[in-house]
Image (cartoon, coloured by chain):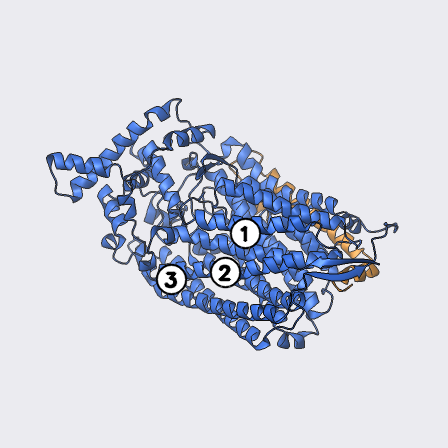
Chain colours: A orange, B blue
Amino acid sequence: MLKYIKNHMTSIDGIEIYPIISLVIFTTFFAVILWKVFSLRKSEITKLENTPFD
Amino acid sequence: MEKFSYDNSIVKKFSYATMTFALVGMLAGLWIALELAFPSLNVARWVNFGRLRPLHTNAIIFAFVGNAMFTGIYYSLQRLLKARMASDLLSNIHFWGWQLIIVCAAITLPLGMTSSKEYAELEWWIDIMIAVVWVIFGWNMFATILKRRVQHLYVAIWFYIATFVTVAVLHIFNSLAVPVDFTKSYSLFAGVQDALIQWWYGHNAVAFFLTTPFLGLMYYFVPKAANRPVYSYRLSIIHFWTLIFLYIWAGPHHLLYTSLPDWAQSLGVVFSIMLLMPSWGGMLNGLLTLRGAWDKVREDPVLKFMVVALTAYGMSTFEGPMLSLKSVNMISHFTDWTVAHVHVGGLGWNGMMTFGMLYFIFPRIFGTKLFSVKLANTHFWLATLGILFWTIPMYWAGFVQGLMWQEFKPDGNLEYEFIDTVAQLKPMYMLRSLGGLIYLTGAVIGIINLMKTAYSGKLIKNEEVEAPALTPHTESNEGWHRVIERKPVRMLIFSLIVILIGGVVEIMPTIMIESNVPTIAEVKPYSPLELEGRDLYIREGCNNCHSQMIRPLRFETKRYGEYSKAGEFVYDHPHLWGSKRTGPDLQREGGKRGDSWHYTHFLNPTQMEEKSIMPSYDFLIEEDLYLGRLKSKIGALRSIGVPYPEGFEEDAERLVSVQAKQIAGNIIGDLFKVKGDQKEKAIESLSKKEVVAMIAYLQRLGTDIKVKEHE
């Protein structure tokens, strides 16, 4: 996929850095979210998801 | 325990406005749908398709869906925070301010006061009103969050916060313009940049006005109606952060094969595909909340509406990424396919969610039972049928037209004239109108049912409740996310950063790097008469049916001529690329036909093209061109970079007169058998009419490049 993006980027010098940066940012961001979310305690989750019913 | 009350009056006010504008917006929609099937319904300039279409889209998005969003937020926010809205005064200013904006839109759009930018057509002073009222809404929301009686912010509220922050950013940037006077302004951006900003806005208006607030409502009302917590709270956290992160990047998929630089197009495609995952995560989270409760869905109209809403959300968010693939986009773009896609979201997701929510709220705030479950079920089936009757013909129409445009004969010529494809679509337009009528009938029944419910009970203006006061936070060692969502201001800042990353990466290079838009030496600013003509083109909303963007595809260049170059639009404040071809592209219209052809065509389109569905623009021939603002228009454009020489405006009226007389001369010479003095008089009189300016503009379109070819 990276190659596909890169092939299309001919209009600006050094522009390939933009999508690469963006994909790196997103992947890191996504990994951190996943890790943190799954490290939440079950009791916390139960408390949070019941907010509308309290 | 503290005693306090929830403000239900404000919920009632917004819900009544929602129902009112549902009728107004859908009626306008039905009317314009019928105009395409029966062009004689374009009875007056104020209700011509070009002026009424923006009224329909604005009424549905900002009046109907906007008021529905506020209804749901004011209802759920207070209950999720165990707090009354911070200020009843601010709630009411928000309500009346928003309705005033809608009234201003309903007056100015039919009068032709428009910026022409899709879903942001309103003029600059209304844009300022929107910004002020939006900030009041946000202020009130945050003040309420700060005085809450619960520790943590439920996921629905994060969606409300992201909505507030992002819409503010989008609205302010996209609306930057330099005013000429009260009724006219020019976008600060030109050509490619303007298009990029516009679709960054346009795409994210869908994301953050039509989607995120409704996802928030979904996370509150679906669990409430099903009486069980959301399927996975973990998934909702991932859903939220990835959705707001990814959505903002995807705007350029509206501009595939256009003059937008390739890298930006590809970036838009990749992020659009990735967007499928959080969207479906959210949909599944909603639907799976009903696991083990499907028996309730059979009985409860609220859940029925919400299930169809979620299904429609799933379908349109699957379709969106598919449409962003270049090969699919090649067929779908500029056709009714896009319109169908939008209406799966509008009628299905927003419409069904809104009515489901109203059926939930009304019995509760009026302290009674729903007037008639049977009527609600009738509404449900009519709405569902209406969606099918609306969208299936339009998918068919889009597919047929997209393929017909591409058809070549064995000798290498195009198989079909543009008008053949229009004639082919007429039955589909009629069926679509029927679908709209069915949906609207359902909505009328729903509104009657809701009003009957309201009258059978009595509004509980202040719903008395009690809850313990918020104790200071003592827990240590809590997760990072709980820290963030406990502190709403920090949450706001994090959301802002997340959405800005995409915006910055996507937009900055195009704006900052000049080499991104290669300049073409032959491209010159419009002459004063052409400029006036262009403003008439904007006033009449021609861009709602005609694109000015020829894609670099063989079937496009064969039909319309040389494909569009980014450098051709550098003086176009705003760009007029359009997004739908109900009529043919006009980018290379200049010089294709004589002035008198255009004159007759404006007077009566069917005289020049028998099967045409374009309305008559005879009033352009009757009305004198108003030149009172010409000087300030040139000044305004110069201030944002259009290189009109100093003092040019002093000579502008003379230049108008010279060019207008030439065009009027051509028309009179071709069409009227008058000679001598009479001819001079006729030319003098016609040269002062609006139609001449419009023709001057059309004859200029795309000719800069043609000049180059001749050299």
Nearer to us: label 1 or label 3: 1
Residue name at image x 80 percent, y 48 percent: B483
Check if mark 2's residue and mark 3's residue have beta carbons within 8 Å.
no
Check if mark 1's residue and mark 3's residue have beta carbons within 8 Å.
no
Q: Amino acid at mark 3?
A: Leu
Lateral position of residue A5 relative to residue B595, left or right: right
As displayed, is residue B521 above or below residue B89?
A: above
Lateral position of residue B14 relative to residue B537, left or right: right
Q: Amino acid at mark 1?
A: Gln
Marks 2 and 3, how far apart at CA: 16 Å
Marks 2 and 1, how far apart at CA: 24 Å
As displayed, is residue B181 above or below residue B9?
A: above
Q: Identify the residue under disc 2.
A: B343
In front: B377, or B106?
B106
In front: B623, or B326?
B623
Question: Which element type, helix, strand or loop, lies under badge 2?
Answer: helix
Residue name at image x 33 percent, y 42 percent: B588
Q: What's the chain of the residue with tag 3?
A: B
Question: Where on the picture, by quarter, is residue B39?
Answer: bottom left
Marks 1 and 3, how far apart at CA: 27 Å
Residue name at image x 52 percent, y 63 percent: B347
**What is the number of the mark on residue B620?**
none
Q: Identify the residue under disc 1.
A: B99
Residue name at image x 76 percent, y 55 percent: A37
Q: What's the chain of the residue with tag 2?
A: B
Q: Position of residue B626 (x, y in %)?
A: 33, 37
